[in-house]
Amino acid sequence: MSKINSQVQVATAGEALIDLIAGSDGRFEPCLGGAVYNLTRALARQGIETLYLNPLSRDRFGRQLAAALAQDGVHLAVPEPVLPVTSLAVVNVDANGHPAYAFYREGVADRATSAAAMTQACEETEDLSLVCTGALALSPDDADTYLPWLASQRQAGRTVVIDANLRPSVMPNLDLYRRHVLTALQYADVIKASDEDLATLDLPGDTALGQAHQLLEHSRASLMALTLGSKGAALLTRHGQVFQASEIELITVVDTVGAGDCFLAGLVVAMLQHRLLADWGSAPVSAAVARDLLCSAIASASLCVMERGCVPPTRSDVMDRLETVAMSFEG
């Protein structure tokens, strides 16, 4: 089999959609979005050669999604647009900037793929070392698409990163959804989740850190990144180390759309820069490296929440913030 996209480092799989964000005047502003789409752009804008595996629609929104990916330098596994329409999400943002979503995803372009198609696209890369998915890709309805693909990537020796990024409000059977997410996370080398995600999973533990320990202990992952909102974030390793970091300076939050996606991008960029193996975290790790991972991720997220919608920062933006904003770090 001939190799293409030989420079690709990361492949992403999951939703690309239009966020219709409600304004104070009742009007909706269309913004490019979808958790995995945001992550894909965020990785590319931070200098990572990234392959997006899902198809995009030939409709107007699909063309806009594709144009933004092309502008950021993302490679498309399916370069030709497809007939199904673009997914939509109606987003209402509360007074604290937190979004609530309603999704329209039947017969849409980003779901018009298969495990075989995504696996083949990954096989046709030469230097692919890491794959990412999560969010709506963890719907039980798409199990036949994503679980075999995840299994193939783990078998191929690539680092598998899964962002739980739960959407319980749009899942009709919450118990089934929880079970499926926990099944999907068994394929992860690295898990990213928020404190809200862990609460939705209804895990044992009195605190988010306690719940994170439970999730990591009952998975095969070597590393877990836990976001804690304004309190920063933590890294937990399978070996038992815990690191926590946060920015000391308070920021003005416009909204949190895409914050977790940019956080994960900053984490993955630092992982790649340090050339971390899939099992990093199974043995004792360097606190300095853990600090780099957390600070890169937090700075990326902070830059995102200061913008309306998801506007991923560039790597130079992130580095500038790391040089000018103080971080607390423990571990």
Image (cartoon, rainbow, N blue to C red):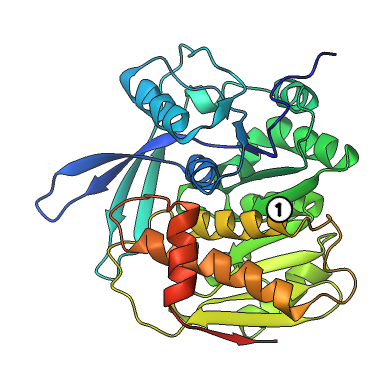
Give the residue displayed 69% in from the left and 56% down from the top. 273
Question: Are there few (<14), some (14-19), or many (20+) residues within 10 Å of tag 1?
Answer: some
Give the residue displayed 34% in from the left and 25% down from the top. 61
Q: Which amino acid type corresponds to the residue marked 1 in the rendered image? A: Leu
Q: Quadrant of residue 190?
A: bottom right
| Secondary element at tag 1 | helix
Q: Position of residue 168 (x, y in %)?
A: 51, 55
Lateral position of residue 264 relative to residue 90, left or right: right
Q: Relative to 217, is 115 above or below?
A: above
The residue at which mark 1 appears reads as: 272
What number of labels is visible?
1
Q: Position of residue 96 (x, y in %)?
A: 29, 71
Q: Quadrant of residue 304?
A: bottom left
Of residues 171 and 261, the one nearer the viewer is 261
Quadrant in which the C terminus appears: bottom right
Inspect this view and state whether residue 299 appears.
yes
Give the residue displayed 30% in from the left and 65% down from the top. 97
Give the residue displayed 70% in from the left and 35% down from the top. 146
Inspect this view and state whether residue 175 appears.
no
Q: Position of residue 237 (x, y in %)?
A: 79, 73
